[in-house]
Image (cartoon, rainbow, N blue to C red):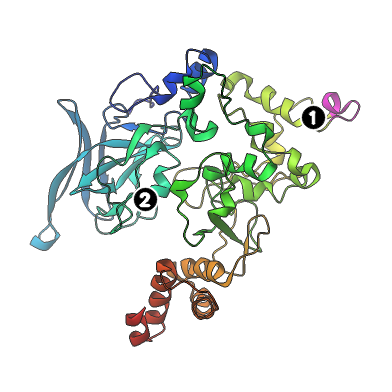
């Protein structure tokens, strides 16, 4: 029987750096609490996050092992087959882990400077190994899943900029520090430390609401699709910036809450009466302490108190379900996730009464931006193109129309590689092979 995953405590080993240790002398209590959170332990060296695996995947017939040998972690894979072209045998050294282990964990390996994700993942809720999401029923081994900087930015710090030829190609290591370090939310603290505190750090609470919220939304806003603004890279985002200057997020107009996505808390919260009535006053830290989570035995009381910050009418706290003090059981659904296997979503679409039914998957229909931000033809076209790549033919027709118009609009940049790549793909699908080749 596999043992429960022990938390990896950031900074215990020097294999992956811990820049946040520089903050500890003056902020010891916060540092000690935070370094035990999932965010602080969202990545690191593979040997620090080692979980042994011995997993046979029935659909593909591949047997996988993850094991440690002489201080290195390895993935081995093997498939015996009567046909020689079906036989497999090999191994890869796993260099880093991604995922704190609270929800799950995967590993990264490198081939000639290109970085890939392990084909198998650890799923913490069920305490089991299975294939990576979207490959549960794969008949072949997915050994070429590229590691994207967008993913790394939400699990690691000091993420390297990828080389021009591929998003998963790096000149050296893909990131400098494991986990989300203090600077990821509070900004670069070098001048603050050098001045012995005389130069102040970024005051997140004093920022205008969209900049304040962007600190969290940089990782906790997903949408059905996300589109980078022309000429922007998410790696350039720093605390204090407006996230929507870099990325637009789209959902379907008929979508229910989070749409079943595991990291879509904000777009679900936007639909809640709590957020609608509170406006900018309500943000992620209204309910969550980013520096630590309450102990299991205190969670119900902790989050109930967060609700009572706004629900202050006379006698409410004493009269409102004294027999069940866990507000979330009635007001926040926990259906299975639609995009991470063996996982549940705490849906932040807070309702008067929830349904335990599985949240519907919104895969077709008209798209709209999260937050009501105006999208250009280019941005909306790229969003529909992503839906087309998932098999939505109606979205493909809409994307082709929008991107063709954007391409010929006044001031359209000829160097917009994203636009031309997607337009070429759509024209190829549409049978316009010569136009596709030109793109």
Against 27, residue 103 (above or below) is: below
Report the front residue among 359 and 236: 236
Q: Which mark is residue 148?
A: 2
Q: N-terminal of the two: label 1 or label 2?
A: 2
Q: Residues within 10 Å of mark 2 (few under 14, many from 20)?
A: some
Res 228 visible? yes
Taking the view exactly as shown, the residue that stands out farthest to the right is: 314
- Classify mark 1: helix, strand or loop: loop
Residue 168 x/y as whole percent: 30, 51
| Residue depicted at x 38% and y 37% | 158
Near-viewer residue (244 or 277): 244
Residue in view at x 41 percent, y 32 percent? 179
Task: Reply yes or no: does residue 318 show up in magenta.
Answer: yes
Separation of marks 1 and 2 at Cα, in angstroms: 46 Å
Residue picked out by circle 1:
321
For the image shown, how many numbered marks are present on the structure? 2
Residue positioned 51% across, 52% down in the render: 338
Quadrant location, the N terminus: top left
Instruction: Choose top left, top right, bottom left or bottom right for residue 360.
Output: bottom right
Residue 316 on the magenta segment: yes
Mark nearest the camera among 1 and 2 is 2
The magenta region covers 312-319
Please provide percent x and percent y for residue 7: 40, 24
Q: Position of residue 39 (x, y in %)?
A: 48, 32
Could you tell whether 108 is left or right of 309 in the image? left
């Amino acid at each position: 029987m596999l043992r429960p995953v022990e938390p990896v405590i950031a900074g215990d080993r020097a294999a992956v750096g811990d820049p946040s240790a520089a903050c500890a002398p003056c902020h010891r209590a916060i540092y000690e609490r935070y370094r035990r959170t999932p965010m602080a332990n969202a990545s690191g060296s593979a040997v620090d996050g080692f979980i042994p695996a011995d997993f046979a995947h029935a659909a593909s017939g591949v047997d996988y092992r993850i094991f440690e040998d002489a201080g290195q972690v390895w993935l081995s894979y093997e498939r015996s087959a009567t046909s020689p072209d079906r036989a497999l045998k090999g191994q890869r050294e796993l260099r880093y882990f991604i995922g704190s282990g609270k929800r799950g964990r995967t590993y990264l390996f490198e081939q000639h400077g290109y970085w890939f994700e392990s084909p198998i993942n650890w799923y913490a809720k069920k305490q089991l190994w299975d294939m990576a999401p979207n490959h549960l029923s794969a008949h072949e081994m997915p050994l070429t899943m590229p590691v994207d900087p967008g993913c790394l930015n939400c699990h690691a710090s000091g993420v390297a900029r990828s080389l021009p030829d591929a998003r998963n190609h790096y000149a050296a290591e893909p990131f400098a520090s494991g986990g989300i370090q203090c600077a990821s939310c509070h900004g670069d603290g070098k001048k603050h430390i050098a001045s012995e505190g005389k130069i102040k750090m970024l005051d997140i609470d004093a920022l205008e609401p969209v900049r304040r919220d962007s600190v969290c939304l940089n990782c906790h806003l997903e949408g059905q699709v996300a589109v980078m603004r022309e000429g922007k890279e998410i790696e350039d985002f720093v605390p204090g910036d407006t996230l929507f200057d870099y990325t637009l997020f789209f959902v379907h107009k008929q979508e229910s809450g989070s749409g079943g996505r595991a990291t879509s808390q904000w777009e679900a919260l936007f639909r809640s009466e709590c957020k609608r009535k509170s406006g900018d006053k309500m943000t992620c830290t209204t309910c969550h302490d980013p520096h630590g989570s309450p102990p299991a035995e205190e969670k119900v009381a902790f989050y109930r108190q967060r609700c009572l910050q706004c629900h202050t009418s006379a006698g409410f706290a004493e009269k409102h379900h004294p027999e069940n003090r866990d507000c979330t059981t009635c007001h926040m659904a926990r259906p299975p996730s639609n995009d991470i296997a063996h996982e549940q979503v705490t849906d932040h679409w807070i309702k008067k009464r929830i349904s335990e039914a599985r949240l519907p998957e919104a895969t077709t229909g008209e798209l709209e931006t999260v937050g009501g931000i105006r999208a250009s033809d280019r941005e909306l076209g790229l969003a529909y193109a992503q839906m087309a790549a998932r098999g939505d033919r109606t979205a493909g027709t809409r994307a082709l129309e929008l991107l063709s118009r954007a391409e010929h609009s006044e001031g359209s940049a000829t160097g917009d590689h994203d636009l031309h790549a997607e337009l070429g793909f759509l024209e190829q699908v549409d049978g316009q092979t010569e136009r596709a080749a030109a793109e």
